[in-house]
């Protein structure tokens, strides 16, 4: 509860999200009244090699379900990726625009998830991490970026909460106030998520089983969004 208190009141007038002028297909804007935002990366679609088309469908379904619940009114979900050419960002941005999800609290954003305030001018108090099953710092991708940006105390705070994580599960870690991620980026919580893995060189490989894979991905997004919702209550 203490952790939840840190999150404070809803942010007023969430900053307009930067528009990529040359990419009209991506609407980097929340077009409804702003609230508290979860910034999250596309789970499993880089190092874990999950099929992008399937991942986009599962993500959109999970986002739609979350935003349609009355209890989540005022909460926003923002998919972040490093490059405007990101295949997942483009795919999801296109489907979201078709479904009118931008009016309901969804946006896509190009940038580093660990620099949303200092570079993007945004205030996303909660961010998600594509973790590994041992919750270890390093590796690559978002995991490396978040542990690097958050510092040693955050690593300790993560270890205090759990030693491992199962596919589809989440671990919520309050960001220590001494962490640059808290001080410079205004992030109060990181939610570690372990997505399904299709990479033969990583643990828990599903070996192309997309029936299981999609189910785990769906569970991962649902748990992530529910953890976020719980933090705000
Ligand atoms: N900011 C925003 N998006 C990013 C950033 C960043 N700093 N870095 C990467 N992305 P990945 P996975 C995007 O590989 O597939 C790690 O080694 C990236 O372009 O981080 O779930 C862990 O330790 C892609 O769209 O996650 C695990 O072992 C998305 O984030 C494993 O990778 C996810 O890419 C997890 O693999």
Image (cartoon, rainbow, N blue to C red):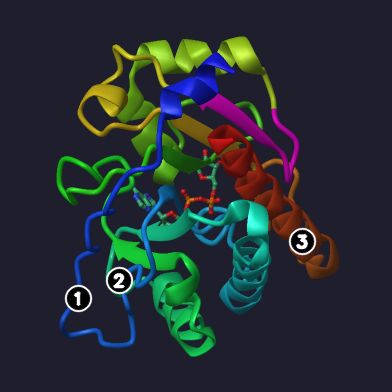
The structure residue drawn at horizontal position 60% and vertical position 72%, both measured from the top left corner, is 60
Question: Depth check: 88 or 34 in front?
Answer: 34
Q: How many circles with numbers are drawn on the protein?
A: 3
- Looking at the image, residue 97 sits to the left or right of residue 1; the answer is left
Where is residue 189 drawn, in percent x and y?
A: 46, 30
Span colored in magenta: 165-174
Image quadrant where residue 32 sits: bottom left
Q: Is mark 3 within 8 Å of ligand 1?
A: no
Query: Where does label 1 land, which residue?
Result: 20
Which of discs 2 and 3 lies nearer the camera? The answer is 2
Q: Residues within 10 Å of mark 2 (few under 14, many from 20)?
A: many
The structure residue drawn at horizontal position 59% and vertical position 64%, both measured from the top left corner, is 67
Contact (CB < 8 A) between labels 2 and 1? yes
Query: Where does label 3 land, which residue?
Result: 213
Give SS at disc 1: loop
Quarter holding the C terminus? top right
Where is residue 143 drawn, in percent x and y?
A: 45, 38
- Looking at the image, residue 50 sits to the left or right of residue 15; the answer is right
Image quadrant where residue 13 sits: bottom left
Query: Where does label 2 land, which residue?
Result: 28
The structure residue drawn at horizontal position 49% and vertical position 71%, both measured from the top left corner, is 104
Where is residue 106 drawn, in percent x and y?
A: 46, 66
- Camera sees residue 93: yes
The structure residue drawn at horizontal position 70% and vertical position 31%, both measured from the top left corner, is 165
- Looking at the image, residue 5 sits to the left or right of residue 12; the answer is right
Q: Earlier in the sequence, mark 1 or mark 3?
A: 1
């Amino acid at each position: 509860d203490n952790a939840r208190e840190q999150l404070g009141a809803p942010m007023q007038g969430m900053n307009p999200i930067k528009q990529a002028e040359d990419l009209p297909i991506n609407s980097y804007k929340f077009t409804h009244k702003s609230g508290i935002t979860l910034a999250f990366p596309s789970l499993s679609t880089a190092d874990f090699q999950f099929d992008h088309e399937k991942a986009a469908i599962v993500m959109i379904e999970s986002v739609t379900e979350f935003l349609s619940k009355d209890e989540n009114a005022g909460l926003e979900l923002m998919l972040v990726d490093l490059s405007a050419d990101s295949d997942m960002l483009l795919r999801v941005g296109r489907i979201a625009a078709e479904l009118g999800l931008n009016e309901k609290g969804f946006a896509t954003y190009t940038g580093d998830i660990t620099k949303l305030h200092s570079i993007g001018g945004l205030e996303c108090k909660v961010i998600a991490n594509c973790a590994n099953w041992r919750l270890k710092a390093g590796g690559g991708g978002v995991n490396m970026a978040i542990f690097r940006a958050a510092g040693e105390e955050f690593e300790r705070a993560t270890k205090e909460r759990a030693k491992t994580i199962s596919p589809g599960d989440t671990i919520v870690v309050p960001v220590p106030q001494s962490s640059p991620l808290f001080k410079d980026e205004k992030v109060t919580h990181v939610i570690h998520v372990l997505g399904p893995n299709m990479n033969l060189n990583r643990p828990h490989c599903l070996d192309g089983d997309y029936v299981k894979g999609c189910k785990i991905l769906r569970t991962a997004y649902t748990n992530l969004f529910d953890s976020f919702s719980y933090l705000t209550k």
